[in-house]
Amino acid sequence: MGAVVGVSTFTLLLAGLPTRGIALVPRPQFAFMDVPTLDELRRQIDSIDDTLHDLLMRRAELVERIGASKPAGGLALRPGREAQVIRRLLERHAGRFPANAMVRLWREIMGAFTFLQCPIRIAICRPADQPGYWDLARDHFGVQIPFTAHETPSQVLAAVRADPNVVGIVPAPVQDEPQPWWPRLMSGDPTTPHIVQKLPFVVMPNSRGRDLTGFVLARLDAEPSGHDRALIAVEARAEISRSRLAAAIRKAGLQDATALYDVEQAGTYWDLIEIPEFVGDADPRLAALALALGIEGARVVVLGAYAVPPVVP
Ligand SMILES: C=C(O[C@@H]1C=C(C(=O)O)C=C[C@H]1O)C(=O)O
C-alpha cells in the first residue's frame, strides 16, 4: 500500500491523475514514479532537437564530399536518387507525425543540399492566372534555391538552354494544347534538356499547386529510380494511328503505353508516348520502334523519364 509515498499532489495534477481518494485506489508504484514532468518532457525534446541538428550538420559534410565527386560545373541534382530517399523513408514511416510533413522536411533538406553543391536555379512556367506552379516548385525544391517565374514554356526552355544550372518546370502535357513544349525536346542540340521528374512527387495538402502537374526539365540524363516511366517522342511526316503505334510499341518489346499525346504542325506529326518502365537513350528498343512503325524517316527519341510518385497514406 505504499503507492503514493513520495509523490506530490503537483506531480499527480500534471499527470492528470485524481488527487482525492488515492489511498482507496492503490496503483502499482511504477505508474506514479514514471510520469515525467512537463520540464522533463521538454528536456527530452531539446535533446532530440540537438541530435537532429547535429545529424543535419553531419549530413552536410557528407553531401559536400558527394558534391566534390560529381563533374565540376555540372548540375548536382539527382532526381532519381531523391525519389529513392523519399520512398525509403515513407516505407519506414510510422506513428503520429504526418507522412507528407515528413516528406516536406526532406524536400527542404534535399533542396538546400543540392544548392550547397551547385548554383542551381529554377525557372518556372507560372502564368499570371496559375500561381499554383510556384507552390509546386517550392514544395519540391524548398526555400533556398532561387526561382524565376516565366509566362510560357518557351521562355522556361530558353532559360534552361542558356545555363546548365537552370532547371525548368513546365505544365505536364495535355492533349490538344496549341503549342506543346515537348516536340522541342527532340532537337538533338546539346543544350536540350531531358524530362527528369514529375511534380508533385508527394502532394502537399494546403498547396495551391495540389491539383496541378508539372514536369521538371534539366540538362541531365534521367536516371532509373527503380520504379519509373519513360517519355518517348516520335516525329514523322505522316499521321500514325493509335492502333499502329500500339502495335509497333509491342513489336519493339516495350510495355504498353500509359499515356499518349499527339500534335500536328505544318505537315509534321509528333506523338508522345509514356511507357511504364525506364528507357535510356541507348536502349535498342528505340531503333526497333522506329523500324516497327514502317514510316520512312520517322524519328524516335527518349525525352526522359520520371520516378513514379509514391502512394502516401
Ligand atoms: C547528396 C546528393 O546530391 C543531391 C542531394 C541529395 C540529398 O540531399 O540527399 C540527393 C540527391 C541530389 O539531388 C547525391 O547525389 O546523393
Image (tube, grey):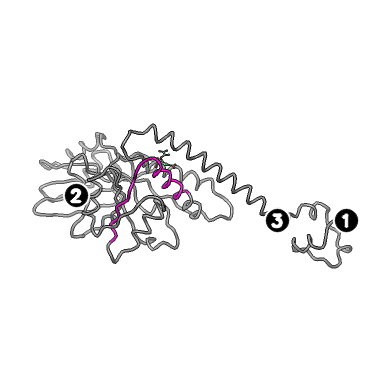
In the image, is 90 to the left or to the right of 4? left
Question: Residue drawn at (21%, 39%), measured in percent from left and top?
Answer: 190
Residue at position x 47%, y 40% in the image: 60
Residue 16 is situated, as x and y percent measured from the top left of the image, at 75, 63
Whether tag 1 and tag 3 are in contact, CB under 8 A, the answer is: no
Which mark is first along the chain, 1 or 2?
1
Residue 113 among those drawn in magenta? yes
| Residue 17 placement (x, y as % from top left) | 78, 63
- Mark 1 and mark 3: Cα distance apart in space: 22 Å
Asked whether disc 2 touches disc 1, contact meaning CB atoms under 8 Å apart, the reply is no
The tally of labels here is: 3
- Secondary element at image label 2: helix
Q: Is residue 257 above or below residue 16?
A: above
SS class, disc 1: loop
Quadrant the N terminus occupies: bottom right
Q: Quadrant of ligand 1?
A: top left
Q: Is mark 1 within 8 Å of ligand 1?
A: no
Please provide percent x and percent y for residue 216: 31, 49
Rendered image: mark on residue 39 = 3
Snapshot quadrant of residue 23? bottom right
* Tag of residue 5: 1
Kind of residue indicated by mark 2: Pro
Disc on the earlier residue, 3 or 2: 3
Q: Which mark is residue 183?
A: 2
Q: Which residues are magenta?
A: 106-126
Q: Circle 1: is it few (<14), some (14-19), or many (20+) Cα within 10 Å?
A: few
Q: Is residue 172 magenta?
A: no
Q: Nearer the viewer, mark 2 or mark 1?
A: 1
Q: Amino acid at mark 1?
A: Val
